[in-house]
Image (cartoon, grey):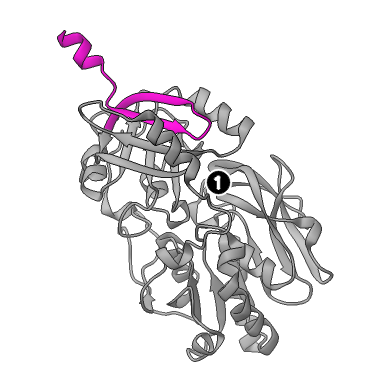
């Protein structure tokens, strides 16, 4: 009897099509409903869980060794985990890393995030690739009591990310300054003391490391909420405007973001740089369209080609929507493409320092393949001031 009780599942993952996966629960107890995606990165599980772009999603990790380096506050991309839950193959083992300050299981429990281990993540990933990102319900009960019919019904009733504006839920409540630069051995994070350019960063769900990269490129960064107006942006007298990453449907966020960006583009000659959702916001403001992808791009091994040079960058990606390259208007060129599926990964206005990319140059999987984008933004601001 003891062996039977020990083997009893303590967590389950119910898909909207009725498929159910049983496993071992850890982290918080309870249940949540979200879209299920998979991430192929071998490192950075803490950064992934705290990336605001994962709001409304449960992450399946294809790499089995999740939790092996513990967690540390230095690696948080925002204050607490934003991803709704975690799916892994093996239960996390005791961490072994000199930077660790807490175990992954304890961190998930403390921050209220549910996780399930013991899952055949290969089978689950194949299902996501073939059928698209499903709506799921994830439940963790130490007693192993689950109402499967109710969980499947919840997954089916969840409305999904299309039409959902999540940027308002993860953006900052008020403006703030940022001066911390990228981590470097042996000092760690240091403060920038000689900024050359004033940048306003619009926070649709900004990752801290993006702000650090801006600071390291010589920017004095002021972060404004996602709903900031053009008047509020220009009141800071910036040398450039940055559009951050974020979650949800770009068309929904664009209801208030696009008018602001159009005003900036129409009334000023300021350099503008966007990443991820910021890339999609810029594209919408320029007249393009966005589309929902089958299962999206989530990982740290995505090859992207820069069209002008033919250079291939190894990038980190996290997006379930994409800019439709066929909808790009005259005067807007496609600068980067995914070598996995040919989807759009970058745009630029012809003859103006206005550009954006779908991938995450701050994540540095290359490791420095894409940092030139921050330098390009800084150079554009320097050129404008010099002229």
Q: Residue at the spot x=51%, y=36% of the render?
A: 40
Extreme residue in the left direction: 2
Viewer can see residue 279: no
Secondary structure found at label 1: loop
Rendering coords of residue 123 (x, y %): 52, 23
Please give the range of residues in magenta.
Answer: 1-25
Q: Is residue 7 magenta?
A: yes
Q: Is residue 357 above or below residue 95?
A: below
Q: Circle 1: is it few (<14), some (14-19), or many (20+) Cα within 10 Å?
A: some
State which quadrant residue 346 falls in.
bottom right
Rendering coords of residue 343 (x, y %): 72, 48
Q: Is residue 127 magenta?
A: no
**Residue position marked by numbered label 1 in the rendering:** 366
Q: Residue at the spot x=53%, y=84% of the render?
A: 229
Viewer can see residue 230: yes
Rendering coords of residue 78 (x, y %): 35, 59
Q: Residue at the spot x=52%, y=66% of the render?
A: 244
Q: Considering depth in this image, is 29 or 370 the residue closer to the camera?
A: 29
Q: Is residue 354 above or below residue 299?
A: below
User: Is 359 left, or right, of 202 in this rendering?
Assistant: right
Rendering coords of residue 209 (x, y %): 43, 60
């Amino acid at each position: 009897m003891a062996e039977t009780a020990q083997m009893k599942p303590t967590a389950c993952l119910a898909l909207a099509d009725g498929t159910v996966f049983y496993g071992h629960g850890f982290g918080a107890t309870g249940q949540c409903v979200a879209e299920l995606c998979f991430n192929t990165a071998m490192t950075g599980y803490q950064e992934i869980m705290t990336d605001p772009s994962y709001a409304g999603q449960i992450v399946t990790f294809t790499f089995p060794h999740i939790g092996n380096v513990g967690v540390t506050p230095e690696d948080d991309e925002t204050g607490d985990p934003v991803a709704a839950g975690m799916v892994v193959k093996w239960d996390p083992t005791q961490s072994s890393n000199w930077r660790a300050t807490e175990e992954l299981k304890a961190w998930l429990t403390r921050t209220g995030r549910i996780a399930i281990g013991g899952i055949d993540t290969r089978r689950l990933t194949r299902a996501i690739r073939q059928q698209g990102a499903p709506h799921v319900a994830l439940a963790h009960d130490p007693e192993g009591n689950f109402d499967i019919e109710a969980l499947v019904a919840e997954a089916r009733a969840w409305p999904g990310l299309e039409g959902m504006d999540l940027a308002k839920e993860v953006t900052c409540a008020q403006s703030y300054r940022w001066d911390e630069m990228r981590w470097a051995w042996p000092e760690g994070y240091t403060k920038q003391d000689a900024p050359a350019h004033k940048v306003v960063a619009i926070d649709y769900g900004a990752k801290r490391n993006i702000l650090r990269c801006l600071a390291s490129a010589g920017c004095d960064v002021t972060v404004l909420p996602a709903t900031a107006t053009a008047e509020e942006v220009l009141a800071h007298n910036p040398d450039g405007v940055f559009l951050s990453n974020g979650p949800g449907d770009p068309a929904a966020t664009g209801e208030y973001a696009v008018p602001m960006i159009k005003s900036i583009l129409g009334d000023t000659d300021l350099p503008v740089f966007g990443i991820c959702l910021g890339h999609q916001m810029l594209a919408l403001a320029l007249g393009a369209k966005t589309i929902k992808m089958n299962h999206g791009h989530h990982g740290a091994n995505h090859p992207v080609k820069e069209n002008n040079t033919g250079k291939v960058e190894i990038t980190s990606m996290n997006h379930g929507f994409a800019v439709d390259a066929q909808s790009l208007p005259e005067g807007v060129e496609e600068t980067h493409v995914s070598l996995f599926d040919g989807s759009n990964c970058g745009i630029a206005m012809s003859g103006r320092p206005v550009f954006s990319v779908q991938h995450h140059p701050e994540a540095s999987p290359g490791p420095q393949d894409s940092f030139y984008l921050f330098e390009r933004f800084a150079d554009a601001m320097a050129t404008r001031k010099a002229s």
